[in-house]
Amino acid sequence: MKRSQYIAQAGIIAAVYAVLTFIMIQTGLASGPIQFRLSEGLTVIACLTPAAIPGLTLGSVVANAALLPVFGPTALLDVVFGSLGTLLGALWMWRFRQRRALALLGPVVTNALIVPAYLPVILAAGGYYEHTIFGVNIAASWPTMYAFGVVTVAVGQFVSVYVLGGLVLMALRRPGFERMFGIERG
């Protein structure tokens, strides 16, 4: 793949990821104790092109930075570590692209393990500690918060990656699309 094509693909992926996340931020589903991001469905593109790795990571940095006005400086945790989860998930996907079910597990696992580690700090800054969700007092101890976050982030990621991402993969696997955009067959 030509360098210019690689950069263009990464830029388009970053922009679409960021815009979809911005939309979900407006609904309140992208940043609370229970997270669902449509943009995570795009992570499957890392199974098709290595340009998705920097594209998804940059898109995550930009999108997570949009949370700074909402959560203040604590949102920098999401900018750094949330984007790290996206980077690791994308690298995992590219590495295991020949085994799709395993590849799609990458962003689910990385985000489910990383995001809940700092989520209590961000939620405290946003005033979410005053709420009970599904019978769980999210002001409880950090281990309880972490366990709750692992489950809720994993569920949101699973739906986004396996269901929405599966549909994205089916659409992008069409031969004409692959040739047009230099997508690698795997």
Image: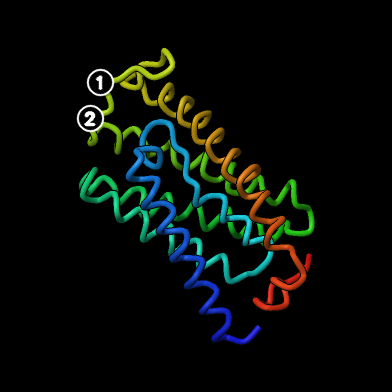
- Out of 16 and 98, give the one closest to the viewer: 16
Residue 27: image quadrant is top left
Residue 80: image quadrant is bottom left
Q: Are marks 2 and 1 in contact (CB under 8 Å)?
A: yes
How far is disc 2 from disc 1 in space, using C-alphas? 6 Å
- Out of 168 and 53, give the one closest to the viewer: 168
Q: Residue at x 55, y 45 (%)?
A: 110
Q: Which mark, residue 91?
A: none
Where does the N terminus fall, quadrant-wise? bottom right
Looking at the picture, how far across and down is residue 40, in whole percent?
Answer: 53, 50
Question: Residue extending furthest top?
Answer: 135
For the residue labelled by badge 2, is the local secondary structure a helix, a strand or a loop? loop
Q: Residue at x 65, y 76 (%)?
A: 181
Q: Residue at x 21, y 49 (%)?
A: 69
In the shown orientation, is residue 129 left or right of residue 31?
Answer: left
In the shown orientation, is residue 19 left or right of residue 104?
Answer: left
